[in-house]
Image (cartoon, helix red, strand yellow):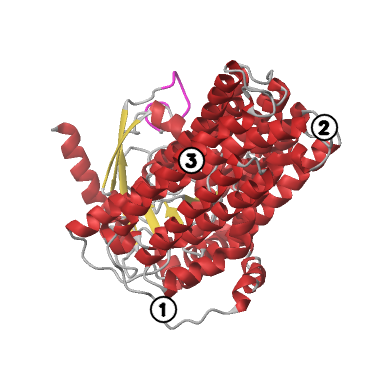
Amino acid sequence: MPASPNDHTTSAPVPLPDKRSRWSFRALLALQAQNAFNDNTVRFILLPLGTAVAAQMADVAGPHRHYQHVLLALMILPYLFFSPLAGWLADRFPKNRVIVGTLLLQTLVFILIALCVQTRSLWPATAGFFLLAVQSTLLSPTKTGIIKELVGPARLSFANGWIQMSLILAILGGTFLGGWWYDSRLRNALDAGADDASAPWLAATGPIWILAGATLIALALALGVRHTPAQRPDTPLQARLLWAHFGELAHLFQRTAIRRCAIGATFFWAAGAMVQLIIVQVALDLTGGGAGMGSSASVMVACASGGIALGSMLAALLSRRRTELGLIPLGSLLMAASALFVAFAPPGTPTFMIGLTLLGATSALWYIPLFALFQEIAPEHERGRLLASVNILNNIGMITATLCQLAMIQSGVPVSWQFALIGLAAGIVAIYVTRLLPGDFFRLLILPVIRLVYRIRVTGKEHFPEKGGVLLVSNHVSFIDAFILSTACPRPIRFLMHERFYRIPFFTWFLDIFGAIPISPSKAKDALRKAAAALEANEVICLFPEGALSPDGKLGEFQRGMEIILRSQPRPVVPAALIGLWGSWFSYSGKGAFTGLPRIPKSVSVAFGPALDPTTTAAEARQQIASLLGDLEKKQNA
């Protein structure tokens, strides 16, 4: 399932990247992947080992029985309590030295775990696993914060993409290898005549010693990372670092939109933690805690984690032009359906594995745009502080999920019901976010259909301001102009619509979802005031200045409503022209709109012109659109 939610970037002076810096980044890429690989490999070695030891204990009701919950809690707690200390280290000392120090700690801890396993001391080895989680916590902000110093700002997104991809692959590889390696050696030990009490320890000892040796490779790579200056070398270490960050949660909850995003992110991480624990329970039920338990659990976790990777890539592709908020309700609905699919699938079967993959993919599909929204709306000067608070909330959610799943086991709740409860929770989330984002949700469903029906050619998108209020003005030739412009525009649009459309019952609901503003001759001022308020809120408002559909396909005279809006709220004016819809079933061509057989043109062209000054008159805007229409017609006839 997901890796840690706790990585965040610290600021740093940025030198020009040189050959040494590029080599240092490659070394960082390798050592952080190795760190994640080792942690997950040893986890899925200790997990079946602890389960096997539990089977040998007389008191199986003790902590051994719930060893998977202990391991997950030990992974989370260091991030909850030591993240501020990790941030202090990243700022107080040169980051390359912190990296070397933490990787040296990793080597020492692995040696400790190996010695404990060799001497058959499970709980000291488990304490060593906790120290590994502490080591990862201390490394986290340093390895993330040094990236910009090594590659420079221009290649920061590219570098972060490689870091995340290698991290996911390392987690998947460690998860799969740990369980398979242990089970393979356990069978060999049993085949060689080892007794049931000795075989689990023999199976775990060799791999952990090999992992301990492999940590020396990462340590050697760390020694070659370029020196970076300390950010705040005079910052003293204060005891309040261990508890002051909990007070930041109150700041996180002060703003409604930020609070909602934070709670949504916490649900994602909590659900991920619960799914991991249910998977381990399924593996225990399938194998009885014996041979095959480790590989069974690791394969199922790898399916869910692989699904998260696939869902993340899909969300990135669908949001390549803008953050696609419609994925949040859609993804949560699909997550609810996927959880119910898993609940009814026979555990351990290919159908069950497919369900886990779908569950991971659909959860990422809504989490990625949700967290992108959080990053967008968080004020820049507070972003780091808010991210740290979200990390605290995420870890609290994961601990809570661990306790809830433990309570369900104690109460005898079947695995199928546990997945069904996750589906029910996701369904409630889906209903809530759909009510918050109905317009984005239906845009996501409808606009792809428009793209399938029409081949829309768009030019001039680079003229559209990325942020701030914008008044979009366009010619008006058909009843579906709004859909075409919404598909072509790089930002969501709210339209001023004639009030007569609001007399159609279905359309009233539909237009309200999309935030349309009704306008009529008797209430024109009210509509223009609402449009100005939307511009002030940094939205894109589209106005058809002709005031009605073109009766002959030609550009009509513009009314002065746009000038009234701009006097109240001066904002850039983007002219738009569209051709190809005159003569369609939705235009007044021929016998009128919606008469005869549907006539749908194969292609439509939309052109956005350079943004005009807020002092632009209606006549000047008309002239610009006429010019754009002329250019489009020339291209069409060429």
Q: Nearer the viewer, residue 48 or 72?
A: 48
Could you tell me the amino acid type at mark 1? Answer: Arg
Q: Which residue is mark 2?
A: 413
Report, in whole angstroms, how far the alpha carbon at label 2 lies from the one at label 3: 39 Å
Residue pictured at 46% horizontal, 41% vertical: 211
Please give the range of residues in magenta: 588-598
Q: Is residue 620 visible?
A: no
Seen as rendered, the residue at the extreme left is 638
Give neighbour class at mark 1: few <14, some 14-19, many 20+ (Cα, 10 Å).
some
Q: In the picture shown, does residue 91 fall above or below 263?
A: below
Residue 522 percent location from the top left of the image: 58, 58
Q: Mark 2 packing: few (<14 Cα in 10 Å), some, or many (20+)?
A: few
Under tag 2, what secondary structure? loop
Residue at x-position 34% and y-position 68%: 614
Mark number displayed over residue 621: none
Q: Which residue is at the far right?
A: 411
Q: Is residue 147 magenta?
A: no
Q: Residue 417 at what x, y percent from top left?
A: 78, 30
Report x, y in % for residue 542. 43, 53
Check disc 2 and give the amino acid type.
Val
**Residue 261: quadrant of the picture:** bottom right
Specify few, some or many for label 3: CA neighbours under 10 Å numbering under 14, 14-19, or 20 or more. some
Seen at 24% across and 44% down, the residue is 629
